[in-house]
Amino acid sequence: MTHFLVSDENPAGHKLEDLLCNLRADIISRCNKITNDQRPEAMAVLSNNVKILDHLTEAIILATESTRILDRSFGPSTSEKGGPARIGI
């Protein structure tokens, strides 16, 4: 069973790209709070967060492309309405 993503057991779940976008926004918000902090620790955390943001952006692009592939091949998802999964057994 998935905890966050749409599935047969969790029809009220979220699309992966939506969760990743929300996570990215949260990280950007945190980054904004420490951009003027010149302490080495804050600068290291900010540097790490920028790298994480790059990876998240790549993940969002991949997740969005997967949704497009599924939409193009099988039509829009009906999972949130109790419909079957478009792929998988």
Image: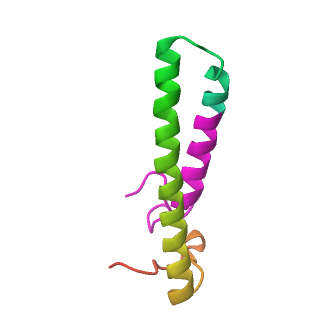
Residue for point 44% across, 63% down: 9
Residue for point 55% across, 62% down: 15
Q: Vertical placement of 84 versus 64: above or below?
A: below
Residue that protrudes farthest toward the left in the picture: 89
The residue range painted magenta reads: 1-28
Relative to 6, is 81 on the left or the right? right
Image quarter hosting the N terminus: bottom left
Q: Is 22 a magenta residue? A: yes
Q: Vertical placement of 64 versus 60: above or below?
A: below
- State the residue in front, 5 or 1: 5
Name the colour scheme.
rainbow
Q: How many marks?
A: 0
Residue for point 55% across, 59% down: 17
Q: Is 57 a magenta residue? A: no
- State the residue in front, 52 or 38: 38
Image quarter hosting the C terminus: bottom left
Q: Residue 53: where, in percent of width, then height? A: 53, 43
Q: Residue 48: where, in percent of width, then height? A: 45, 32
Residue for point 60% across, 73% down: 81
Relative to 10, is 89 on the left or the right? left
Residue 14 appears in the rendering = no
Residue 28 appears in the rendering = yes
Q: Residue 27: where, in percent of width, then height? A: 58, 36
